[in-house]
Image (cartoon, rainbow, N blue to C red):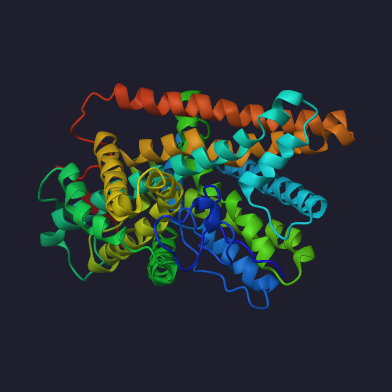
Amino acid sequence: MPGKKGAWSPQGTVDLKLDLRPPLESAKELQNKDSGLLDGSPSELPVLEKTQGITAFQALIHLIKCNVGTGVLGLPLAVKNAGLLLGPLSLLVMGFVACHCMHILVRSAQRFCHRLNKPFMDYGETVMHGLEASPSSWLRDHAHWGRHLVTFFLILTQLGFCCVYIVFLADNLKQVVEAVNGTTTNCQYNETVVLTPTMDSRLYMLAFLPFLLLLVLIRNLRVLSIFSMLANISMLVSLIIIAQYIAQDIPDPSQLPLITNWKAYSLFFGTAIISFESIGLVLPLENKMKDTRRFPAILSLGMSIITALYIGIAVLGYLRFGDDIKASITLNLPNCWLYQSVKLLYIAGILCSYALQFYVPAEIIIPFAISQVSKRWALLLELFVRFAMVCLTCVLAILVPRLDLVLSLVGSMSSSALALIIPPLLEITTYYSEGMSPLTIAKDILISVLGFLGFVVGTYQALHELIQSEHPVTFSNSTIFIQAKWHST
């Protein structure tokens, strides 16, 4: 069988080679090798071994694991922005639509694989061939731009997640350090802890910069897969501890709004869609399965489990903390070492995940950059580009240090395009010349329009919230001069 491809996910897709060759190897060559990095949303997958294929159960586990990451920690705040009734309903609809768009991508890729006699086709290739099948001559002539568009949103999303990670690292470490003097081993009593102010959160971001620069020097996916495993273990343990805590002592929810205004809801969209952005995962997972005919059922089952988990964590988190819910639910946990360990575990997991998220845009940008210079300067230029990209994500995180707004911006700007806007349009360009029912066309147009509205309104509102901030130094998720309280568990 011809060499298969792997891909990163969930915020787009790119095919990667397992053992990197010299720097001058092009991105095209990287796409022709077996195995790759399957990354979650940002939770990460270890490299899938393509020997005899994976079973349906293994595919289900990988699908769930790649979806459940740091994005779930911001969903309680997303429900606050939508309302106790509208939030869960919107998550349900969003999960259904995201799953439907994944099915569209799978069907389109399968069609072109059969037509062109190819064993596998990634997201970008599928979009390119979809445009080539379009009845519009202009779209056919510019079909290669479809692949470039997917690549652009992939880079944008990945670097955006790197920014989210830096803000997350700084916020959680800041809170742990400020509360360390009052942290105890007893989580059973009501107490009030006055946090000790330390340096600004932006200085914490700079403190992580040297570690991030060292991590991105790792170019071998076999080594990165070890970091992926460590990240998955730490996040799984943390989520279990969080879930058992928020399910206890839920106060009266009668004062919580059922529906909020459209401005707050636009922030909900960006935060929520970023959690469902795993569409780039579906093609490599299907390709790795022993029996690909079972994949549609596995995809539907997996997304149903994921949606139910998201709604459960989001609703319970909002019910537990109400209007005091923060950009990451870890920032609401009590000040005892059991729950402080959750933050430390997630800090370790996110630190490991940064190199994995960074790998994808690096393998797109670096081969192009070093192809412009001689071999003599290739290694030096590669190091410069890697360090410059890390510094760029750090600078952007410092400029927009509010975790909630960073999540909303990334989700609205790029995740909505990859998950909601492009797949329905792909279905139209792929099947229109063969005849489509008006109802199907209307459905696809509606999904794309709603995704585009979320793209525009969510991006605008996130930027507006940032510009209109009355206190640019003290951020909503900062812990400076805040009294942290917890109730008995």
> How many discs mark residues in the rendered view?
0
Describe residue 63's horizontal placement relative to residue 254 as left or right. Answer: right
From the viewer's side, name the closer residue of 253 and 384: 384
State the image coordinates of residue 352 (x, y, percent, origin top left).
Answer: 34, 63
From the viewer's side, name the closer residue of 168 and 309: 168
Describe residue 336's horizontal placement relative to residue 308 as left or right. Answer: left
State the image coordinates of residue 165 (x, y, percent, origin top left).
Answer: 34, 50
Describe residue 476's horizontal placement relative to residue 77 as left or right. Answer: left
State the image coordinates of residue 121 (x, y, percent, origin top left).
Answer: 68, 53
Seen at 78% across and 36% down, the residue is 133
Residue located farthest toward the bottom when viewing the structure as drawn? 52
Up-down relation of residue 486 to residue 428 (above or below): below
Describe residue 158's horizontal placement relative to residue 415 as left or right. Answer: left
**Which of the 4 image quarters holds residue 397?**
top left
From the viewer's side, name the closer residue of 63 and 259: 63
Residue 96 appears anywhere in the view: no
Up-down relation of residue 433 to residue 352 (above or below): above
From the viewer's side, name the closer residue of 160 and 315: 160
State the image coordinates of residue 268 (x, y, percent, origin top left).
Answer: 48, 36
Which quarter of the image is occupied by the N terminus?
bottom right
Seen at 76% across and 70% down, the residue is 291
Residue 414 appears anywhere in the view: yes
Seen at 43% across and 69% down, the residue is 225
Which quarter of the image is occupied by the C terminus?
bottom left
Up-down relation of residue 119 to residue 450 (above or below): below
Up-down relation of residue 236 to residue 204 (above or below): below
**Which of the 4 image quarters holds residue 185?**
bottom left
